[in-house]
Image (tube, rainbow, N blue to C red):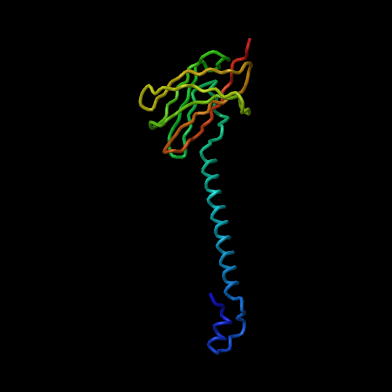
Amino acid sequence: MRNAQLVFQEEGIEAPRGIAADTDQEGRKMLYGVLVAMGLVAGALITAAVLSMNSNRDLPLDPACSLSSHACSRTLPDGTRISVRIAPNLPSALKPFNVDVRLSGNEAVRVEFSERGADDGLDQARLTQVGPEHWQGVGRLSLCGSAAMTATVVVSIDGLEWRVPFGFAMESAR
């Protein structure tokens, strides 16, 4: 591509003021800079949207509801209602206990148990669908001693995984 100064010289025309010999190169550099900036902005927006979507799928623990005293219910932003009950209300380490989950809709569901505030020692209850919107299973805690525990119901809805925590206490070891 020829620059503007050469075109004016070949035609025998005096170039207008301000047109330099490297006008085309400057224009290309500016265009590349704009394209790079637009790419960076688009990448940042996509990253923010993905991070926002992921954090919205983890509901916070509701301290007002404890499975140690009664069944608890939560509602997801899409209106799906989840109810959980464990029996006995104070499960003991290494002893089986019943887990009952009811939720509106027929989504895939599982329950994970962990000591509150710790990432190690994850136990799971295998649930079987026993009726429409109703799952039951047996859980077992591998931890010994008294601990604040979390039962996290994990529900898959339309390809998204929602994690809904419910607090409870474990019976002290004797």
159 relative to 93, above or below: below
Q: Quadrant of residue 148?
A: top right
| Image coordinates for residue 77, horizontal then vertical, percent | 47, 39
Residue shown at 44% from the left, 29% from the top = 109
Question: Residue at 57% across / 60% down in the picture?
Answer: 36
Residue 33 picture quarter: bottom right
Q: Is residue 106 left or right of residue 170?
A: left
Residue 166: % across, % down: 53, 28
Q: Residue furthest left?
A: 132
Residue placed most toward the observer, 25 or 61: 25
Residue 74 at x, y percent in the picture: 48, 32
Q: Up-down: is 135 above or below 39?
A: above
Displayed quadrant of residue 102? top left
Instruction: Indicate whether 99 appears above or below 163.
Output: above
Front position in the image: 14 or 146: 14
The residue sitting at 61% across, 79% down in the picture is 21
Residue 157 x, y percent position in the rendering: 43, 36
Q: Nearer the viewer, residue 141 or 18?
A: 18
